[in-house]
């Protein structure tokens, strides 16, 4: 550990995980909850209520396809949805810089309102603070949310139990078993490249739109089919970080296939210019789902029938042959997918 905080400590990869595990976790873990803090899933669970929180510092505040307001609602809703719960209510806290334009605040609030309606949730409490000019960069939004177990999740788990032993009642990172198919709901890299293009400091422009969106309704349709064992959105640290978390927590190997990973052509061009790995880029409107093999094709077809999941693809499977996340390249070689130190683009969420 370093002696001071860097941007990498908030970037979602190995460095942030070290900060949480070495400095924070031992002070707050140990409570007897259904899904406790030490599980490090996207949300915790107590008395069948899912609780999550997230803070948003994206730069710029407005970007092609979204803004900090849409992101704050979508991200929190998605963290609840990937646990298998129905989001029911949110809180929102604003920390603003003195001098922040009221017109910009109004745009952000309008975006939050629209996204709440889209997701079918409401904000029921909040907080507002202002700091002196220069103390923060414009605005930070914290959004917390609660959700509850649905009958759809119970039926989904009943389907899983027809095919294998399943001892948990939630979609956890530790649920993945050998043979499970790995589905991604759409193309990777859109959000990160949209943010980079909007900043105007990287020497390129694109027409890429961020994928930021609430995914709870799409997730519910997948659960209605049944057979889903785990789900997670590949935000900070991207798909590479997600797969490493699943592999470590489930003690399983995961093989994905490069020629199956959906990436738009304009994203490929931008990545070639920037020299970045799409697997490490954060996304805000995609979900990765692990499904028992018997139901994978049916879940995939259901995702494809939704607007958010129309480009869904099976990209790999879990295996007992090794215990790491790995990639089979287009030429047939294999390499380990290393857990990124952090997202290569800071402040994308």
Image (tube, grey):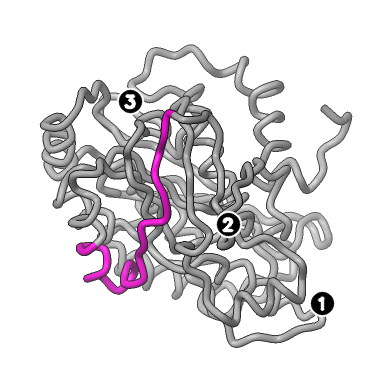
Number of residues whose C-alpha sits closer than 10 Å to that of mark 2, classed few (under 14), some (14–19) or many (20 or more): some
Residue 86, image x, y percentages = 25, 47
What's the magenta region?
A: 301-320
Count of labels in the image = 3
Q: Which residue is mark 3?
A: 46
Residue 63, image x, y percentages = 60, 77
Q: Which residue is mark 1?
A: 201
Q: Residue at x 38, y 13 (%)?
A: 32
Q: What is the spatial separation of the Cα atoms under label 1 and label 2, in whole angstroms?
A: 32 Å
Q: What is the spatial separation of the Cα atoms under label 3 and label 1, in whole angstroms?
A: 44 Å
Q: Residue at x 64, y 24 (%)?
A: 21
* Left or right: 267 in relation to 233: right
Q: Residue at x 68, y 37 (%)?
A: 14
| Label whose residue precedes the other's in the sequence (1 or 2) | 1
Residue 276, image x, y percentages = 72, 63
Q: Which residue is mark 2?
A: 329
Residue 117, image x, y percentages = 30, 68
Q: Is residue 47 visible?
A: yes
């Amino acid at each position: 550990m370093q002696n001071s905080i860097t941007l990498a400590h908030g970037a979602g990869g190995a460095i942030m995980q070290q900060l949480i595990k070495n400095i924070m976790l031992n002070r707050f873990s140990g409570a007897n909850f259904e899904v406790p803090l030490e599980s490090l899933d996207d949300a915790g669970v107590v008395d069948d209520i899912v609780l999550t929180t997230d803070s948003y510092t994206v730069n710029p505040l407005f970007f092609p396809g979204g803004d900090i307001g849409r992101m704050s609602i979508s991200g929190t809703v998605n963290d609840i949805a990937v646990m298998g719960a129905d989001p029911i209510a949110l809180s929102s806290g604003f920390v603003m810089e003195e001098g922040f334009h009221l017109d910009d605040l109004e745009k952000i609030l309008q975006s939050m309102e629209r996204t709440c309606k889209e997701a079918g949730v409401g904000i029921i409490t909040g907080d507002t603070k202002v700091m002196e000019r220069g103390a923060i960069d414009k605005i930070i939004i914290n959004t917390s949310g609660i959700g509850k177990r649905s009958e759809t999740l119970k039926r989904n788990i009943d389907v899983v139990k027809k095919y294998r032993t399943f001892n948990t009642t939630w979609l956890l990172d530790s649920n993945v078993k050998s043979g499970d198919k790995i589905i991604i709901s759409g193309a990777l890299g859109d959000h990160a490249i949209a943010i980079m293009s909007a900043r105007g400091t990287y020497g390129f422009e694109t027409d890429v739109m961020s994928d930021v969106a609430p995914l709870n309704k799409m997730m519910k349709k997948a659960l209605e089919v049944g057979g889903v064992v785990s789900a997670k959105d590949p935000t900070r640290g991207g798909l590479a970080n997600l797969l490493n978390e699943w592999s470590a927590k489930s003690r399983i190997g995961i093989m994905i296939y490069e020629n199956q990973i959906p990436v738009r052509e304009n994203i490929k061009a931008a990545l070639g210019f920037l020299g970045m790995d799409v697997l490490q880029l954060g996304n805000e409107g995609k979900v990765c789902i692990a499904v028992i093999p018997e139901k994978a094709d049916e879940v995939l077809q259901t995702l494809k029938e939704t607007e958010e999941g129309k480009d869904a693809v099976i990209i790999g499977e879990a295996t007992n042959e090794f215990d790491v996340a790995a990639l089979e390249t287009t030429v047939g070689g294999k390499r380990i997918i290393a857990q990124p130190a952090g997202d290569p683009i800071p402040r994308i969420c």
